[in-house]
Image (cartoon, rainbow, N blue to C red):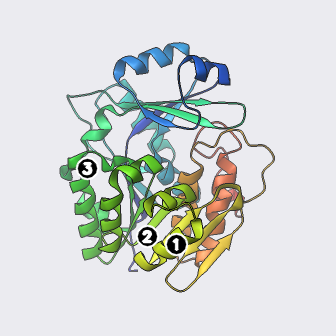
């Protein structure tokens, strides 16, 4: 690839994460399914906030977390996502920029409030997300900065944002600009429920080569191909896509190309605290490696290092600069 201003540009939901530790009893009282991501309205958001204590508040959203991870490796990352011009939107923007991520998407002056995700972490490290999407769903083609896309080695798209029609148009426009400039486009499938809703559309994006790289966990890939056999799903994505990165939790990850499959084990950890952001940070490590010329196995090892760091504490941002982890 030709030289670029940014290694990775991420497009996705601009969300402020509100995180706290809870026990299983609270999940039962609030009728929350452990490990799930549930969309909620403003009233439910306020009610949940009322039962949370000792909260940590940070900028979040899957693709934004990936951008933070790339920056933590010493990479050059940027983010496009929509917030409202409100106090929570200011918090998101300020927090993201402090991590070293370039963020310049204009805030909305009216409409719904900035998005928030209320994340409840149980003692087993499982996170249950309750998300009010608000302003982030209003990302549009007008928010896609052509120069930013052209200047980024990889443009990374968040599957969670495939719901709104305007966001779909924004994603396709970004992919068109990136390919015209000789750049690569990646997508994360985000969640099995996203895959179930948009299976045909995701497959079209992949088979048409609108995207060049697919990130998924094992369950998401199985859902994409409607199988319960991961090996079958891997064989299918090999036929459909030039490059896929499939995480399988504590078993590590597979990098799938048309000719080969590379397996990289997970990094050992001392204590599993919170799985929030594990996939996002794995993608950050892999994309940082890929954009800076590393081979598939090295890039996947960087992903494993990043995922291992983030699951040992609350929240989806590294607490130790990832560049120090690879020194």
Could you tell which of marks 1 and 2 lies nearer the N-terminus?
Answer: 2
Residue 291, percent from left and from top: 48, 71
Residue ranking furthest to the bottom = 259
Residue 163 in the image: above or below residue 17:
below
Residue 114, percent from left and from top: 34, 30
- Of the residues tagged 1 and 2, which is closer to the observer? 2
Q: Which residue is mark 2?
A: 213
Whether residues under marks 1 and 3 lie with C-beta atoms below 8 angstroms apart, the answer is no
Name the residue located 53 percent from the left edge and 67 percent from the top edge.
Answer: 245
- Label 2, residues with CA under 10 Å away: few <14, some 14-19, many ≥20: many
- Of the residues tagged 1 and 3, which is closer to the observer? 3
Residue closest to the eye, 180 or 203: 203
Question: Within the image, what quadrant is residue 115 found in?
Answer: top left
| Label 3 secondary element | helix
**Residues at marks 1 and 2, CA–CA distance in whole angstroms:** 11 Å
Could you tell which of marks 3 and 2 lies nearer the N-terminus?
Answer: 3
| Horizontal side, residue 35 vs residue 67: left or right | right
Q: Which residue is mark 3?
A: 167
């Amino acid at each position: 690839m030709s030289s670029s201003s940014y290694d990775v540009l991420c497009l996705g939901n601009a969300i402020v994460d509100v995180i706290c530790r809870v026990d299983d009893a609270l999940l039962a009282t609030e009728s929350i399914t452990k490990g799930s991501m549930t969309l909620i309205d403003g009233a439910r958001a306020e009610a949940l906030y009322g039962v949370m204590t000792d909260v940590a508040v940070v900028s979040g959203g899957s693709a934004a977390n990936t951008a933070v991870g790339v920056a933590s490796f010493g990479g050059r990352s940027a983010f496009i996502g929509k917030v409202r011009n409100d106090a929570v939107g200011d918090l998101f923007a300020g927090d993201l920029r402090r991590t070293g991520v370039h963020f310049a998407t204009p805030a909305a002056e009216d409409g719904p409030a900035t998005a928030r995700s209320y994340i409840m972490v149980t003692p087993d490290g499982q996170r249950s997300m309750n998300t009010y999407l608000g302003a982030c769903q209003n990302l549009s083609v007008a928010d896609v900065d052509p120069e930013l896309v052209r200047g980024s080695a990889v443009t990374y798209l968040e599957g969670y944002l495939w719901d709104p029609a305007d966001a779909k148009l924004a994603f396709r426009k970004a992919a068109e600009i990136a390919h015209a400039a000789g750049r690569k486009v990646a997508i994360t499938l985000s969640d099995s429920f996203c895959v179930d809703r948009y299976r045909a559309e995701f497959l079209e994006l992949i088979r048409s080569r609108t995207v060049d790289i697919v990130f998924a966990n094992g369950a998401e890939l199985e859902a994409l191909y409607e199988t319960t056999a991961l090996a079958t799903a891997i064989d299918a994505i090999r036929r459909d896509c030039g490059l896929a990165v499939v995480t399988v939790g504590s078993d590590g990850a597979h990098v799938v190309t048309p000719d080969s499959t590379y397996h990289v084990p997970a990094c050992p950890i001392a204590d599993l605290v919170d799985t929030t952001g594990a996939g996002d940070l794995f993608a950050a490590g892999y994309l940082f490696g890929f954009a800076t010329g590393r081979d598939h196995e090295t890039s996947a090892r960087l992903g494993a290092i990043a995922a291992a760091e983030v699951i040992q504490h609350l929240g989806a941002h590294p607490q130790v600069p990832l560049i120090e982890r690879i020194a």
